[in-house]
Image (cartoon, rainbow, N blue to C red):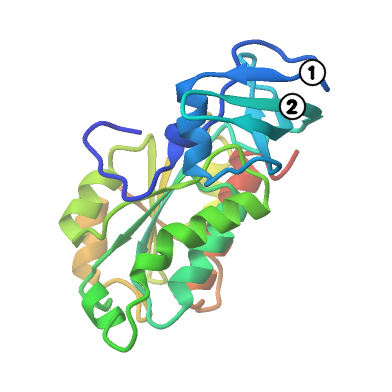
Amino acid sequence: MDSNRKCINLAGSLSRVLLPNVPVLDEEIRLGPEALQALDCWCGRIGEIFTVIDPQLSEYRARIVDKDAFSVTVLPFLQVAPTESPVRIELFQAIPEKERFELVLQKATEIGVSRIVPYHSSRSITVQERDAGQKKSHRWPDVLLRAARQCRRAEIPELSPVLDWEEALDQCVEAEMSLICYEGEGCWPLAEVIKDFRGQRIALMVGPEGGFCLAEVEQARSRGVLPISLGPRILRTETAAIIAAGVIQFTAGDLGN
C-alpha cells in the first residue's frame, strides 16, 4: 500500500498470508504474528480455508488448524494457479445511486482489481446523499471481504475513503497508464490502448450516470489521462466499470491465460 494513500479496510499487502518457505503439502506450518495479523484481516477462524503465498509467489489453499494470541498453524493441502494478477488495476468509481456500488465492489474483486477508489464528480451523488435513505457505506469493506473469500483471492482489494474529484485525479495520474471512460469524441478503443502495455499499474476512472462533464475530461486529458471508449452503446456506470476492468485484465493481466 502506498504510504501517502489511506485505506479504510484491512487489505492489500496487509491481508497476504506469507509462508517462510516452499511448503510440503499436508505438513503443518507454524506462522508468526505477521501471518496471524493477515488472517485477522480475513476474520479467519480455526477450520477455515484460505489462500496463502510462498516466497516464489506460488499460491496454495491452506486450512487453519490452530491459532493463539501470537501465532497460527496452517496446513497447506493444494497448490493452485495464482489468483493475484501481475497487473495492478486501480478502479476510480464515481459514487452511483442505490446498490450499484456494492455490485461494482463485488465484481471488481472477482475480476482481480487491486484497489477501489470511490469519488465525487460534478454529476455524481455524494456519499451523504447515497446514505440518506439507509446508511450502507459502512458495509463496503464487508462486501469486499466476502467477495475476496468467495473467489479465493490471496489478498483483499484496498478500499479508499471517498475522495473529491481533484484528489481522485491526483491519485489516478500516478499510475503508469491512466484511463478515463468517455462517450464523446476523440477517444481510443480500450483494447487498442492497452494491447502493448507492459507495466504493472493501470488506473481507470469511471464516471456517474450521465458521464463526465467536458471540463472534467479536458482536465484529465491535460494531466495525461487518456479518454477511452467501450464501444458504441451507452453503458450504465456499473456495467462500464465491470466491462472495462475485465477487458484490462484479459488483455494485460491474467484473464486471458
For the N terminus, the quadrant is top left
- Kind of residue at disc 2: Leu
Whether tag 2 and tag 1 are in contact, CB under 8 A, the answer is yes
- Does any portion of residue 36 appear in the rendered image? yes
Tell me, for residue 128, which label it has, or none: none
Q: Is residue 123 left or right of residue 159?
A: left
Q: Nearer the viewer, residue 247 or 142?
A: 142
Q: How far from the left and from the top, in percent, is residue 23? A: 73, 15
Q: What residue is disc 1 on?
A: 27
SS for callout 2: strand
Mark 2 / mark 1, whichever is N-terminal = 1
**From this viewpoint, which residue is outermost toward the bottom?**
133
Q: Residue at x 47, y 46 (%)?
A: 157
Q: How far from the left and from the top, in percent, is residue 136? A: 37, 75
Q: Residue at x 42, y 63 (%)?
A: 140
- Does any portion of residue 223 appear in the rendered image? no
For the C terminus, the quadrant is top right
**From this viewpoint, which residue is outermost toward the top?**
21
Q: What residue is disc 2 on?
A: 75
Q: How far from the left and from the top, in percent, is residue 10? A: 40, 43
Mark 1 closeness class: few <14, some 14–19, many ≥20 residues within 10 Å: few
Q: Is residue 111 above or below residue 257?
A: below
Q: Nearer the viewer, residue 47 or 137?
A: 47
Disc 2 to disc 1, how far (Cα)?
Answer: 6 Å
Q: How far from the left and from the top, in percent, is residue 92? A: 36, 56
